[in-house]
């Protein structure tokens, strides 16, 4: 990091003063900085977790929301406040409103998890369900703000919100003065802007690294372009919903573009593995966005190779996770840790072939094994295998190929992991024309009916798979009996329906098991 220029120094000084004057401790607590002993031993560095899940609303968002609202005048508080949020910010605003004796109106998407809606209501806020996304909720919040004169409380792009989140940076330096690197989850940038402002002002040698989900990396895109860019909302990955933001904030980017040393992106599987790591060390369950910083820390360490032991801190930013979602997280954690690989393997369709294949695998545990008879000559197996490391996985692939097994590594194939593993058991008729699509349906009543109504009777659905993963959007795999000449017209219908989708025709997992 370059030396802070005079203008930058002045900006940081302004924010440090605001951080020191923040009123977060009226409602927030100074959270512990806890060593993750098992993870530290594994990576060869001291790993510390900043436990923001200890806050009363189970996330750091109470800091910024309360500090913003505590600065409002009596007249502004009397008008009431409004916010758009699907969860953590909503709870922070609701709690702050209760403590400051004002009325909070929270616009949430109709697909928001019930546990979060009920939590916001329990804190006394008025919940308004509108749309199926944060962007739709935001538009409605702005309409209501203008109509009723409410004060809008932004989830990240506000100096007082940034300062409230920045108190975490202040606590970090008070708790450990020998930090080398701090890893921070990034959505709109309020958290990392506040932490970077404080740390870089007092100890500029400490690295501040932002971590984003691979499918919603708006800050990474902005840093690369050296300007704020807006990602397409329909393309955002919603797995780590707490940081799924289309565009980084103006105020936040002004700080972060100068004082964040690096930005890393992590996959869904890497996030799931980090949730497991946190559980193993703390017996607490982080939400996906809350575990992103740990996933980034592991990637950073793995990329850097051997070096002198470092003191690394990761912000565990929240623990508001639906219980239903744990099933999906548990299924993907081993893949994210590179301890499980998924293969499509062909073996002769004859007695003894299964046993021979198992002997070829050796002493490694088979975690999943799916098969159905479909061809008199060759059988195609969907196989999960536990491996101790990526290197061991590569060695096993080589061993099986040398043994003459035709195979494909499907460890990174989303269709295979989300859908095919539950569908192995039957193939479509020979010669049937199918176009395959993967959708994200909003988890609300009527979503499927709406889909079918818009589609009409133009195409027959020849394959359908849906499984609830405890998220705001359900993952759906659909095949239509349609030819290549129908693709353009079919795609036009799907665009008009409005659900996010991508074509998967020709996906190797589908070809191997279902086509």
Image: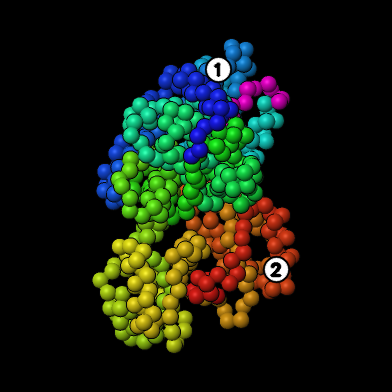
According to the picture, the residue beneath numbered tag 1 turns out to be: 71
Q: Quadrant location of residue 440?
A: bottom right
**Residue 438 in picture, x, y percent from top left:** 58, 61
What is the distance, in whole Å, between disc 1 and disc 2 at their CAs? 56 Å
Segment tinted magenta in the rendering: 146-157
**Residue 322 in picture, x, y percent from top left:** 44, 43
According to the picture, the residue beneath numbered tag 2 turns out to be: 487
Residue 486 falls within the magenta-colored stretch: no
Q: Identify the residue at the far top of this view.
A: 74
413 over 191 or under it: above or below = below
Q: Secondary structure at mark 1?
A: loop
Q: Secondary structure at mark 2?
A: helix
**Mark 2 crowdedness (10 Å alpha carbons): few <14, some 14-19, many ≥20:** few
Q: Residue at x 44, y 45 (%)?
A: 292
Q: Residue at x 43, y 55 (%)?
A: 269
Choose the circle earlier in sequence order: 1 or 2.
Answer: 1
Q: Nearer the viewer, mark 1 or mark 2?
A: 1
């Amino acid at each position: 990091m370059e030396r802070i220029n005079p203008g930058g120094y002045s900006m940081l000084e302004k924010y440090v003063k605001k951080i020191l004057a923040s009123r977060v401790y009226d409602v927030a607590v100074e959270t512990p900085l806890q060593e993750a002993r098992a993870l530290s031993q594994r990576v060869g560095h001291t790993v510390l977790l900043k436990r923001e899940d200890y806050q009363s609303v189970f996330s750091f968002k109470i800091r910024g929301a309360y500090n913003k609202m505590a600065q409002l005048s009596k007249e502004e508080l009397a008008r009431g406040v409004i916010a758009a949020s699907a969860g953590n910010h909503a709870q922070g605003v609701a709690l702050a409103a209760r403590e400051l004796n004002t009325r909070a109106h929270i616009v949430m998407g109709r697909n928001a998890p019930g546990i979060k809606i009920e939590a916001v209501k329990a804190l006394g806020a008025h919940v308004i369900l509108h749309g199926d996304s944060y962007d739709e909720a935001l538009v409605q919040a702005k309409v209501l703000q203008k109509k009723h004169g409410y004060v809008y409380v932004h989830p990240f792009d506000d100096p007082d919100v940034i300062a409230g989140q920045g108190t975490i940076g202040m606590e970090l330096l008070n708790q450990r003065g020998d930090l080398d690197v701090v890893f921070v989850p990034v959505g709109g940038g309020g958290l990392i802007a506040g932490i970077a402002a404080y740390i870089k002002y007092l100890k500029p040698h400490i690295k501040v690294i932002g971590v984003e989900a691979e499918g919603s990396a708006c800050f990474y895109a902005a840093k690369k372009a050296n300007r704020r860019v807006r990602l397409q909302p329909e393309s955002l990955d919603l797995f780590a919903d707490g940081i799924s933001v289309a565009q980084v904030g103006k105020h936040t980017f002004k700080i972060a573009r100068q004082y964040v040393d690096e930005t890393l992106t992590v996959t869904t599987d890497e996030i799931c593995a980090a949730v497991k790591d946190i559980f193993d060390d703390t017996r607490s369950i982080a939400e996906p966005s809350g575990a992103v910083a740990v996933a980034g820390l592991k990637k950073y360490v793995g990329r850097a190779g051997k070096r002198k032991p470092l003191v690394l801190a990761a912000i565990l930013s929240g623990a508001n996770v639906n219980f239903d979602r744990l099933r999906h997280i548990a299924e993907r954690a081993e893949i994210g840790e590179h301890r499980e690989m998924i293969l499509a393997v062909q073996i002769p369709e004859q007695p003894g072939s299964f046993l021979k294949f198992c002997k070829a695998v050796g002493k490694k545990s088979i975690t999943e094994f799916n098969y159905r008879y479909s061809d008199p000559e060759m059988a195609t197996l969907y196989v999960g295998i536990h491996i101790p490391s990526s290197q061991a996985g590569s060695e096993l692939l080589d061993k099986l190929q040398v043994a003459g097994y035709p195979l494909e590594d499907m460890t990174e194939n989303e269709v295979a992991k989300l859908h095919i593993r539950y569908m192995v058991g039957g193939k479509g008729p020979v010669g049937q024309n199918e176009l395959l699509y993967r959708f994200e349906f909003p988890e609300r009543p009527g979503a499927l009916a709406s889909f079918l109504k818009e589609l009409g009777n133009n195409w027959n659905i020849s394959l359908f798979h849906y499984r609830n993963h405890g998220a705001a959007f359900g993952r759906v795999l659909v095949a239509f009996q349609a030819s290549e000449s129908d693709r353009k017209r079919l795609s036009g219908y799907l665009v008009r329906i409005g659900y996010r989708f991508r074509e998967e025709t020709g996906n190797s997992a589908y070809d191997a098991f279902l086509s």
